[in-house]
Amino acid sequence: MTDQCQKPNHLVRYAAKASSLRTWYKYIVTDDKSFHGKTIHNTVDHYIDTLADLDRNQFLSHGRTSDSSIVTIDFLRQNLSPGEKTVSIGAGNGEYEVHLVLDGQDILITDILDAPLSVTRRLFPEVNTRNLDITTNNFEDQYSDLIGAFDNVFVASLFYWLTNDAAEIAIRNMTRLLRPGGCLLVTFRSKDTFLTWFIDEIICRWERPLNAIKRRLITGKPHYVFRNFAGYRRRLSEFQNLLTYQTGLKQISLEFASPHKELQRSTILRLLAIPEILGPLIPHYGAYHNMFVLKYDP
Ligand SMILES: C[S@@+](CC[C@H](N)C(=O)[O-])C[C@H]1O[C@@H](n2cnc3c(N)ncnc32)[C@H](O)[C@@H]1O
């Protein structure tokens, strides 16, 4: 881990407000012609795969070969200690957290949606789950029994869905869950760099039509491409300021994981072995899963 403590200041904070937030999209191939060429702004529940069709063992082995899954579970194993109480925010189906619960950790798995949590409850009755909206203004009243109750708050891949205003509320509410001296563990996706822009806007845009052609060759049916709202990308410094400016949170460490991951999102780059060749040269530009540990010191 690299120690990257930085003091927030008003000027940087102002820049964060002005915002380099960039909307980004996924390009999706479908056999439904009515989507052709459209841009879809999905509601929150369309984003997640609940893994409802898997059994317990399949659920546990899901994604176990994927970089992001491995590093996230390792990140939790490194930072949670036995006997501590942890709450996970925006956990979806708790795909990572369930492993730690089975190791004996005390984790409350929460999400705004019930659909993914109900899958977790059905497959793992031993797991504690609860519906929780982290962006509500009425947080202390709504979740009074959880205030100050946790040693750790864990949040993976949530912030890219939230605008800066919603993110500020969410961070304030996360600190409300922590006891003083407790830790916020965050995986953050992603930096607003030339590389992410190039892959989002250029490479993905052009390789989806090629994938549509490929799918037609395989299935014999025509396929179409549409653009699907995927969230907002922030600069790392912007996100650090959101986390630390007047929140009582102090950055303890920041780990950059999966440096090849951003490049691997592109089929073309993968086929050309670019992630293997270029990845090691640009470790800090791998946008996926930058992992923060922050201490709550109000
Ligand atoms: C991209 S998914 C991440 C799921 C999981 N943490 C992971 O890393 O695979 C984001 C999750 O945040 C949840 N979410 C969105 N807005 C939320 C809110 N205001 N409060 C709590 N959860 C929210 C969504 O329902 C979704 O399950």
Image (cartoon, grey):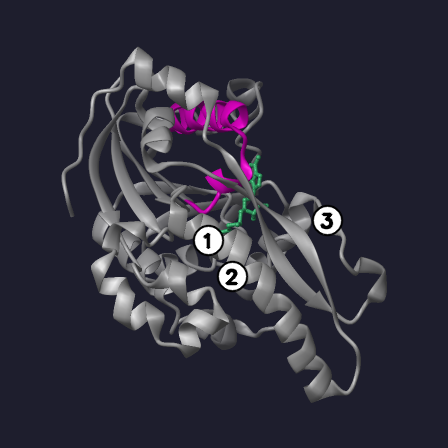
Residue 163 is a magenta residue: yes
Residue that carries the numbered disc 3 in the rendered image: 40
Q: Which mark is residue 221?
A: none
Q: Is residue 88 left or right of residue 283?
A: right
Q: Is residue 51 visible?
A: no
The percent position of residue 152, horizontal first and vertical second, equals: 32, 38
Residue found at x 32% / y 63%: 260
Residue that carries the numbered disc 1 in the rendered image: 198
| Cα–Cα span, label 2 and label 1 | 6 Å
The percent position of residue 21, horizontal first and vertical second, equals: 49, 33
- The residue most toward the top is 10
Disc 3 residue lies near ligand 1 with CB under 8 A: no
The percent position of residue 109, horizontal first and vertical second, equals: 47, 47
Residue found at x 37% / y 32%: 239
Task: Between label 3 and label 1, give the one nearer the viewer.
Answer: 1
| Cα–Cα span, label 3 and label 2 | 19 Å
Q: Is residue 253 left or right of residue 142?
A: left
User: Of helix, strand and loop, which one carries label 3?
Assistant: strand
Residue that carries the numbered disc 2 in the rendered image: 203
Q: Are marks 3 and 2 in contact (CB under 8 Å)?
A: no
Q: Are marks 2 and 1 in contact (CB under 8 Å)?
A: yes
- Mark positioned earlier in the residue sequence (3 or 2): 3
Three-letter residue code for mark 3: Ile
Question: Residue 85 or 231: which is nearer the viewer?
Answer: 231
Question: Residue 112 or 150: which is nearer the viewer?
Answer: 112
Disc 2 residue lies near ligand 1 with CB under 8 A: no
Range shown magenta: 156-177
- Mark positioned earlier in the residue sequence (2 or 1): 1
